[in-house]
Image (cartoon, rainbow, N blue to C red):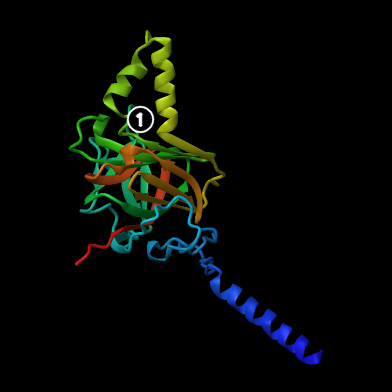
Amino acid sequence: MKLIFTSLLLFVVALASQTRASDPPNTERGHADAHSGSESTQFPAETSPERDAVAGNRGSRAQQHDWDLHFEDDFSGRSEPGKNYRTGHAMQAGWTVRDSVLVGKQVRDDHGSVIRTEVNFDDIDISFDFRFHGGKSFNFVIDDKNEKSVHAGHICRVSVFPKRLIAGDDKTGSMNLEVREQRKNPALAKQSKAALDALLARTRAAADVDIQPKKWHQLRVRIEGESMNVFLDGEMVIQLKSPGIAHPTKTQFGFTVNGSVIEFDNLRVFQPKVSK
């Protein structure tokens, strides 16, 4: 009887060890806010695309990319955005660098202040820190400046408000020129209006959030094919799958700030590794 009990105990221990070995790794760890003099904010560590192939990652395609760091900027050592950035017309005064932080504020009544970085890409993984310091909202926008089927080349975006995030497929949704004409038409037939509303609903997704003023947060946007996944402070909050997101010739990304002011820091841009 003692021999049987010992054998059974050894079997249970071996089974438990095998189960632990098959569990997905725990990738969560905190890091302190790097901004001098700001409140300490803990972010989960899973912000590095190379490590994002963890089992159960929601919203990713079955095909996982390997990623390379393409560009990063912590805005240190200067007082202006620099050569990697282009501001909108008559919006230069809306963008400065102060205490190693990119500061954006609206300077025109008719449009938020625009800043863009030009880079050719398809799939991409971008993260950055941001802080509301009086501003109302901002858009993180991805464009193809050569695409003529949409207003201002807009392909997709994430709109950030203190209490809400909205992800949108601009190419087949709200910025498509035909869609914009229908939205402006007050005499649009009831059936056409219903179809338009259904289209707009399919091409965007939203989440309620709680973004604290004067506190640093992190936004991360990953685009793979038709999928856009949006993370706030390391937690996935929006998944949107829509055909316009897969537009293959994106040429720039950046911010549009409404109100005064919103700050940005620690920009990191990853692109899929190129096979040799």
Q: Residue 251 at x, y = what percent? A: 22, 45
Would residue 147 be found to the left or right of residue 123 on screen? left
Closer to the camera in the image, 217 or 53: 53
Closer to the camera in the image, 90 or 156: 156
Q: Residue 32 at x, y = what percent? A: 51, 65
User: Image point 43% across, 48% down: which residue?
Assistant: 229
Above-or-below relation of 4 to 98: below
User: Image point 24% across, 54% down: which residue?
Assistant: 82
Above-or-below relation of 100 to 260: below
Q: The N terminus is located in which quarter?
A: bottom right
User: Which residue appears farthest toward the top when viewing the image?
Assistant: 187
Would residue 235 be found to the left or right of residue 72 on screen? right
The secondary structure type at the circle numbered 1 is loop
Q: Residue 256 at x, y = what percent? A: 35, 39
Residue 185 picture quarter: top left
User: Which residue appears farthest toward the right when viewing the image?
Assistant: 1
Q: The C terminus is located in which quarter?
A: bottom left
Closer to the camera in the image, 95 or 33: 33
User: Image point 60% across, 73% down: which residue?
Assistant: 19
Query: Residue type at mark 1?
Result: Gly
Residue 93 appears in view: yes
Above-or-below relation of 224 to 73: above
Would residue 199 be found to the left or right of residue 153 on screen? right
Would residue 8 be found to the left or right of residue 221 on screen? right
What residue does disc 1 label?
Answer: 173
User: Which residue appears farthest toward the bottom when viewing the image?
Assistant: 3
Above-or-below relation of 101 to 132: below
Q: Residue 162 at x, y = what percent? A: 52, 40
Total numbered labels = 1
User: Image point 41% across, 49% down: which residue?
Assistant: 263
Mark 1 neighbour class, 10 Å CA radius: few under 14, some 14 to 19, many 20 or more = many
